[in-house]
Amino acid sequence: MRFVVSSALRSIFHNPKETLLILLNMILCTATVFVFVQNYYYLKEHFSDYYDKDSIASNYMVRMNVSNMHSYLDDIKNGTPMYFVGIEVYNEIEKNPDVFFYDFSDSSIDAEDIVDSDKIKDLSSYDSDSECYCINAVNYSEKTFRALNLTVKEGRGFTASDSDNNDPDAPVSVILGNDYKGIYEIGDIIEYDNGSDHDKAEVVGFLKEESYYAYLGSIYSLDDHMIMATEFPRDFESEIKQGLRNHGFIHTSNPDLDLQKYINSITTKNGFYTMELEPADGVEISETKDVSEKNVILIGTLAITGGIICTLALAMIMYNRSVRNRAKYCIFMCVGVPVWKINASVALEMLILLIVSIFPTIALSIYEYGQLMIPIWQIFAFTIPIIMVSLIPTFRVNGKTNIDEFIRNKIV
Amino acid sequence: MAFIELDNICKSFKTGNKETIVHKDLSLKIEKGELVAIMGKSGCGKTTLLNILAGIDYPDSGKYLFDGTETDIRSTRDGIEFRRNRVGMILQHFALINDYTVFENVELGLWETKLPRSERNSRTNAVLDRLGIRKLADSYPDKLSGGEKQRVAIGRAIISDPMLVLADEPTGSLDSETEKEIIDLIRELNSTLGMTFVIVTHDDEVANCCNRVITLQKH
């Protein structure tokens, strides 16, 4: 072992140019593999098949084209004449059975405020904003549920009456993500008590596994979410106000309908503010997915090509060095060092350089993302075979090294 | 029983379709502690004989007994195993590693022993002292004279206390004055350490300094 370690270290430090060349090769190769694997994971984890569906492409975010947003929001809040014009516009738009407004909000519930919180302890996570261990929750209406094309695996979805539940004593309907299976059953009542508010939610269904929702360009899993039919603890803001709110959403199930043109005709007729529609997430995500897939293929090709070039380059460098070092290896063999130890020292040298070469990638990942985005073993799974293949010519030439030729001065 | 015994050794090489017989029914005995010179014309098989004794090459037929035990060397691996701590080698072109210091070149002979570092260091220093090259310990071979290089090579050969030291033309690259120094050194080591030395040489002066001369005939 002493020989193997000492010889490997000596070789690294006594051949600085070669060491640098090998390191550069490996760093480039490792970085390419890292980018490839990371992009692959991103693609795999962030783009559910769900988002290939046309329904998402039919969702749009509504931007109210108003010069004074505060004044507009006050109109809605205080019920000014403009508010009633807005309701007229809203109703007229929704006269089309293929079109409806929807909105949602996400929130978090302090896990400690849920009675029997021990049951759901594992599903809570620390929320630095709320400074508590929280349960993820979203507030969806029946329309939101429909617009996002969510389906339940067990129980039922939301109905219009779930969202219109104004009875403070009646429980809010809740649909749970798949992670809650086994913790709650259909019909269970989840009680909430934070000292001042006391509320109840009744489990009416469970979402199918791997349900997601898209929001502002990102995709979130709903598996660990509680989906409330209304605010929890409840807050009875009218759905009309939600619909008219800036950054609300609109859905159409008719792909042939030019929704922007349709809305423009109604707002113009009523003298209401212009509503600008922006494709909501689905289209962006779908396009991003297409680009990401192409990128992954390109980077994958680059990684494989880079890997082949790296293998060839390393093989050449190591082979030439072995040929040059044959005399030295003969001396080792003369004093009783077996060939396998010589090969092991070469392999160890490459392994050390391989480990060193991964540090720039780790540093880059931590600098950019604050963590190593992919497991190290996956990078090694790509680079170790490169090293192994590149050492084959070296091991072959070492195996054929002949001390007799050295003694007869044919190897110098 | 002799320390080294070759019994009816045959060795030939094939080059294409042509077979060259190097040794045919060669038998010889070398006693422990002897200083033997092997002489003969070029191509008579001196180096081949040395290689067989060192386990670098092996005979086609015949027996090679080392310290009473028949050797069974059939591969490079067997040869390395056989040589380890048993056979030291001194070569004409010194065979030193240029990026190792004198100390490291000599210590190399102990790499395959299980001695602790302190023991290796003290042994290496003792050998350097004995060979008169302690002051060169931190020098590199390319800064040494021919005589100094050969002393380093001798140091590496004897440091593990081998039973047999084989030397192939150890003075072949040296001037006559240095040659005498090296031969005197080998004689001294032979007499004081009791190691068996087998020297392949063309040089009558070297041969005359040995206890016995074996002359090989060309086939």
Image (cartoon, coloured by chain):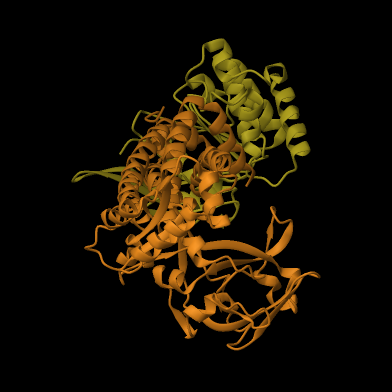
Q: Nearer the viewer, residue B178 or A184?
A: A184
| Residue at far left of view | B17
Query: Which tint is chain B?
Result: yellow
Residue B95 drawn at (x, y percent): 51, 28
Q: Is residue A219 above or below residue A200?
A: above
Is residue A267 positioned above or below A224 on the image? above
Residue sitting at 53 percent across and 52 percent down? Answer: A75
Q: Nearer the viewer, residue A148 or A285?
A: A148
Q: Position of residue B191 (x, y in %)?
A: 69, 31
Please tell me which residue is depicted at 72% across the width and 20% down the height of the picture: B134
Residue B163's quadrant in the figure?
top right
Please name whichever residue, B126 or A21, is drawn nearer the observer in this view of the structure.
A21
From this viewpoint, is residue B6 visible? no
Q: Quadrant of the C terminus of chain A?
A: top left
Q: Give the drawing colour for chain A.
A: orange
Quarter occupied by residue A261: bottom left
Lateral position of residue A250 relative to residue A4, left or right: left
